[in-house]
Amino acid sequence: MMRFRNSTSGLFAAGAAILLVCLGAVYHAARAKTRMNTPLAVHADPNAAGPQQSDADQNAKPTSLSFAADPEVVPPFAMKDLAGEMVSTAALKGKAMIINFWATWCGPCREEIPEMIALQSKYKGALQIIGISEDDGPRDQVARFVQKAGINYPVVMYTDALEKEYGGVSALPTSFLVNRDGRVVQKDVGVYALEYYDMQARYLIGMPVDAHIETFKDTGQIFLKNADKASELPGVSFAGLTAAQRKTALRRLNAQMCTCGCQLTLAECRINDTTCPVSTAIAAKIVKSLRSPKPAADARAKTGVTR
């Protein structure tokens, strides 16, 4: 999914508002992710795309949570927050963290904020939420929003370098979940029910969780740089390829850049934006070129047929 940022231009702002309404509907539809066996939803939107859930569905509990089996160390940073206080991942050693990328203009982010506030209040001392504002506007404007919203955790302004360390953020809100060992065990994109966040927080700080815990190998789900470890890619069929051909296809998909403007490899784009028609078409073309039958001349030579 493409990301959108705020602008002081009135024309752009009007267009962005329309786009954000559409994005909001998409996020509402995407709340229940595949890593939860039982879907959850909050603040149901009657205009959201996709089927609406019943009250029973909305009150259901997740039956499983999924975390990386081989989590990587959280990309470190030390920055001053909007209040001028230093925020450092190194200083938070031994604490669980939720590093939350958001923006004041992002509707789903504003919907999520009360849930982040509730988590910070409930697990203060064991869990530290850090907000990273993707706003292009003045710091003072963001600071006023933070104060009005009652945000009780530090908020820092994004930098291109920081965002790059986290593999890029293509949609908001995006949260990186860090355990007490300082390793990133999951990435959430979109808005979820408070109960889901609460269960994740309990896991991060080592409390009992009433859910089955599953693990997965990070092949780009958390950090896109790990896409080269993937043996499958969303929307790409390797059917009909030999093991060698499949390996060649994956190597090419990880080496060739997508031309949609995302500045990612084809493999990374397929993971980052499963709806991208550009990477879908190019990937299919690469696979087809490897799947194509050998020239007729080669086939005749094998069967002993000559002119």
Image: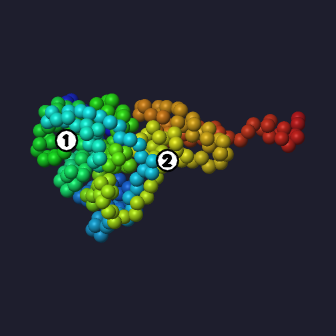
Residue 216 in picture, x, y percent from top left: 46, 52
How crowded pointer 1 is (Cα within 10 Å; few <14, some 14-19, many 20+) is rated as: some
Identify the image's colour scheme: rainbow, by chain, secondary structure or one colour.
rainbow
User: Can you give x and y, in whole percent of width and height, for residue 124 in the image?
Assistant: 20, 52
Residue named by callout 2: 234
Relative to 291, 189 lies left or right: left
* Residue 132 percent across, percent down from the top left: 25, 39
Residue in the picture at 14% in, 46% down? 149
Residue at the spot 44% in from the left edge and 34% down from the top edge: 264
Q: Nearer the viewer, residue 186 or 245?
A: 186
Say above or below: 297 vs 120: above
Q: Which residue is mark 1?
A: 154
Identity, as a three-letter code, of the amino acid under mark 1: Pro
Question: Please, what secondary structure does the residue beneath circle 1 have?
Answer: loop
* Residue 45 in view of the camera: yes
Q: Height in image: 102 above or below 42? A: above
Q: Quadrant of residue 18?
A: top left
Q: Residue at x 18, y 53 (%)?
A: 121
Specify the quadrant of the image occupied by residue 64.
bottom left
Q: Quadrant of the C terminus?
A: top right
Circle count: 2
Q: Amino acid at mark 2?
A: Pro
- Cα distance in 3D space between marks 2 and 1: 36 Å
Q: Earlier in the sequence, mark 2 or mark 1?
A: 1
Quadrant housing the N terminus:
top left
CB atoms of marks 2 and 1 within 8 Å: no
Q: Residue at x 65, y 39 (%)?
A: 290
